[in-house]
Amino acid sequence: QAAKMKLKHNINPVLLQLINFIVLVYSFVTYIPWYIFSGSRQVIAKAKQVKAKPVNNKPGGAYRSVNSLHCLASVLYPGCDTLDKVFKHAKTKFKDKKLLGTREILKEEDEIQPSGKVFKKVILGKYTWLSYEDVYIKAVNFGNGLAVLGQQPKTNIAIFCETRAEWMIAAQACFMCNYQLVTLYATLGGPAIVHGLNETEVTTIITSKELMQTKLKEIVSQVPLLRHIITVDGKPTTWSEFPKGVIVHTMASVQAMGAKADTGNKQQARPVPSDIAVIMYTSGSTGVPKGVMISHCNIIAGITGMAERIPNLGEEDIYIGYLPLAHVLELSAELVCLSHGCRIGYSSPQTLADQSSKIKKGSKGDVTTLKPTLMAAVPEIMDRIYKNVMNKVNEMTTFQRNLFILAYNYKMEQISKGYTTPLCDSLIFRKVRMLLGGKIRILLCGGAPLSAATQRFMNICFCCPVGQGYGLTESAGAGTITEVWDYTTGRVGAPLVCCEIKLMNWEEGGYYNTDKPYPRGEILIGGQNVTVGY
């Protein structure tokens, strides 16, 4: 498989033999000191160890992680069994530490392309940060402000907004006050949005100016119960166009209401673990989008399982958030970070890298400014990064290109044996690594299968583990994730410590859990992370 994934070079065969001989001598001379001092012996042993075992030894029995054979994990911290308690615990522990970061737009201009199309380009400033304490206060005030507007505990409230700090603040407010947060993809079409809002009978929706103007304006009249629209980024100039009975507020004005509200004598309705935290609408690939009801204990179990697969997660880590927060992968990833003292810097696919479509040429993309250590991606994003790197390789001189390819192929062979290549990393791949800020230590892919070739390419060029995960909205995003020392490709890893997985025979399709060489069947997931229903 490694041979198929190698890059092709055009080097004279005699010269190639000489280079191979030099590499062989180098490998021989450095192998023993490297093996003794690098700690790779332990990494290789970990990569080869058994990662999951059957609970009973029957064919088709459930498999669990070897770290949770006797008891599945369900809570991150003792006593923190609801999301508001998890955030309060984090706020107490990391009070003045930075939590949510946003870049200010310094300049926005139209750029006319040779085709005549006009693209909006932006120049962005540095990240400005809200601390754990800042976010907590803003969330408390927003939750109290929503109560002033008439929002009751255990009733639904919708968020239809791009990934940004205000999304997370609104979500935390809802978790605190036991409002059920209905999430809708910002990319959904009008009929799907109407379906979600009417089915959940929401009276309030949280959105942005842009989405209000481009999507909501057209469909508000089809949502008869809607009474309040809250824009996270100020009130648009044409807000008067909305039907009578619909009031437009800004998030800041609702927070101001909440700050003034007298909550002293009111006993707040705190959630219990079984209460619904999120109603997350799927993309609707099999018809109309379905609202998955996810409880507090479902999400906490899921993020407990995910966090266990990320070694040394903590205050030194910076996560870049740019995938849709209405997707379970991004929401779970951000909640994992928030609960461990990490920073979350917000971005978008259009401003992610220096070469991204909205970044003005010569100015910096978000990864270059933020220098994240953790990043989640979907295969589409990874394929885009792969193309960017290969474009840069093709622009190199013949000598540089062949040097890169030789280093790439050498590193691929070493990685497939479980070895590291510090010299190649510092001399050849350091510049490529800078495309994602230069500090990435773990890349995690989910949402769809990642090709083995792209996985290995990212692994080699960015000098970090590239993990894959398998999960669904219905399992709160949790299922399996590969371990950081697993250097194989094309796998999704063992079950997380929060769940167990089994294969059930699918007789119509001819899939049996006794099949050789690999068992096959319908995947069943069990554990606290499995959601309540639709």
Image (cartoon, rainbow, N blue to C red):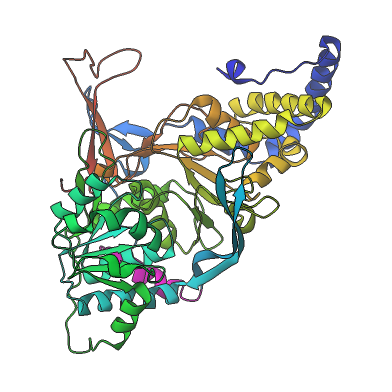
> In the picture shown, does residue 222 fall above or below 80?
above
Residue 141 among magenta residues: no
In terms of image quadrants, where is residue 106?
bottom right
Along the line of sight, which residue is nearer the eye, 192 or 310? Answer: 192
Quadrant for the N terminus in the image: top right
In terms of image quadrants, where is residue 420?
top right
> In the picture shown, does residue 210 fall above or below 532?
below
Position of 311 with respect to 516 (left or right) is right
Position of 336 with respect to 159 (left or right) is right
Task: Inspect this view and state whether residue 74 appears.
Answer: no
Residue drawn at x 28%, y 14% is 515
Residue drawn at x 68%, y 40% is 432
Residue drawn at x 33%, y 48% is 328
The image position of residue 334, as x and y in percent, is 41, 56
Which range of residues does the magenta coloring cover? 78-96
> In the picture shown, does residue 155 fall above or below 42?
below
Task: Inspect this view and state whether residue 97 appears.
Answer: yes
Quadrant for the C terminus in the image: top left
Total number of numbered labels? 0
The image position of residue 300, as x and y in percent, is 30, 56
The image position of residue 102, as x and y in percent, is 52, 64
